[in-house]
Image: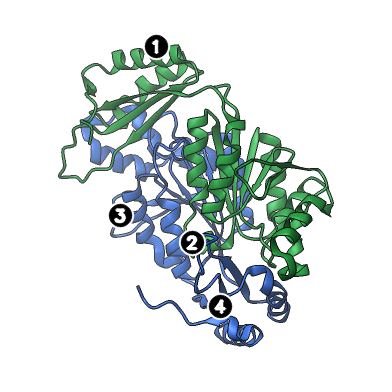
Chain colours: A green, B blue
Amino acid sequence: MGAKTAAVLVIGEEILSGKTTDQNAALLIKELRSLGVALRRIVVLGDVRAEIAQCLRELSASHDFVFTSGGVGPTHDDVTMEAVAEAFGMRLLRHPELEQKMRAFYGDRLEERALRMADVPDGVVLLDSDHLSWPVPVVRNVHVLPGVPEIFRRKFMAIRGRFADAPFHLRELLVDADESAIAGRLDQVVAAFPGVFLGSYPRFHFPNETPRWRVKLTVESKNAGEVERATAQLANLLGSLVVPPDPAA
Amino acid sequence: MGAKTAAVLVIGEEILSGKTTDQNAALLIKELRSLGVALRRIVVLGDVRAEIAQCLRELSASHDFVFTSGGVGPTHDDVTMEAVAEAFGMRLLRHPELEQKMRAFYGDRLEERALRMADVPDGVVLLDSDHLSWPVPVVRNVHVLPGVPEIFRRKFMAIRGRFADAPFHLRELLVDADESAIAGRLDQVVAAFPGVFLGSYPRFHFPNETPRWRVKLTVESKNAGEVERATAQLANLLGSLVVPPDPAA
């Protein structure tokens, strides 16, 4: 569809073991969509440096933008910066601007150990914003964000405008038929409109239910005209199987 | 920790574009944890056969169990079975038992196209259960489950008992200090108990708040005695920074 692409890497054993529920990938799903950026992959990993490094190397090479969540605090399980450095063969350096910010904020309470948070890969770019007291470190196309959801949101929103692209166009059709009865007709539309993404989503119902519709079809592309033409062909092929949209809730 | 390991692959453009919210990885996070299985990685991908195949090959080689969600219906965007076959260099074959089940269920209404759902890799094992009208296909260590949450849950629950392992033991400590003030002490415990997983989770609070605690520490392992000893050392090192648990909500 010619969209910019993105991948999200959520770092944190606490998500995988169910101690906390991820909110950050969920935010990016919504925001990237509204920005017109195609989110192509989400990965959730524990706090294992080598695994994070390898994953980041792959994600960075195959997407326009990569966002990481978590692992940027001062404790032993915060290994994201080391992993980013390892991914790109860079060294960790204590960044003078970050060190100064920490000294100004913590004053006498600053513990030497906490200065780990000023250590960033030598290829870093720091994104500043009026709304942020601490910049967002970017290494190549990897944007390093913290795991705490309130702070993740504030930081992403401060840099959100950089990623804006042309919007997606979407049409939906509700169909009163099983997927297997319409699969052949969907194939025809897919073949006729290779630049359009056609989704087919069956709805769950119990055997004793007679739902008004059984499958939701979605037609989408960055090209609004293509979406209209593909939707028209689909509606034509499905005829009376298409039912009106559900009334607004 | 000597636990069995698992990975989850959620397949579906509809998750990445925000049309639906994943419920299946969330279910597995909870269930695998209670089974004593260490979930090590979650990946969410679109309906792209080559990407799914490559991902499955990697996940299968590095985990004891792999679970996939989605992409098993009859339409053009259902490519999971082809991807599993490609991942392991197998061929897709029409399985006589599955074909017979479909013919019995659909009768005259069966469309040839729908028989795609009876096509499985030639190395498949079908897990049957009294509670299931359709078996769970397993290829090597990959368990192929459907995306519709109600059916995913029913199928996983029917085979859940196969994965039971020794339980995890967990202790928590609440600490009234910033992470940076205690990071050095955490390092000591990590060094003393290499088989124990020590998690450190800062709590968000606004600058004008004075929370009762600032960091939650978790101590866990399959070895209950190690958890008790590591927790005791941690409590000893932190002294009066440890605060009592929150009252039950």
Assign a secondary structure to mark 1: helix
Residue at the spot of label 2? A20
State if disc 4 and disc 1 touch (CB < 8 Å): no
Left or right position of B138 against A93: left
Mark before the other along the chain sequence, 3 or 4: 3
Q: Is residue A77 visible?
A: yes
Residue at 24% in and 41% down: B104
Asked if marks 2 and 3 fall on the same chain, the answer is: no
Q: Distance between the residues labelled 2 and 4?
A: 20 Å
Residue at 52% in and 41% down: A28
Residue at the spot of label 1? A229
The chain carrying label 2 is A
Asked if marks 2 and 4 fall on the same chain, the answer is: no
Residue A37's place in the image compared with A206, above or below, is above
Nearest to the eye among marks 1 and 2: give it.
Answer: 2
Give the residue type that dot 3 points to.
Leu
Mark before the other along the chain sequence, 1 or 2: 2
Assign a secondary structure to mark 2: loop
Mark 2 burial class by Cα count in 10 Å: few <14, some 14-19, many 20+: few
Q: Distance between the residues labelled 3 and 4?
A: 33 Å
Give the residue type that dot 4 points to.
Lys
Q: Can residue B91 be seen in this view?
A: no
The numbered mark at residue B222 is 4
Assign a secondary structure to mark 4: loop
The numbered mark at residue B132 is 3
Report the front residue among A181 and A63: A63
Q: Position of residue A98 (x, y in %)?
A: 76, 53
Nearest to the eye among marks 2 and 3: give it.
Answer: 2
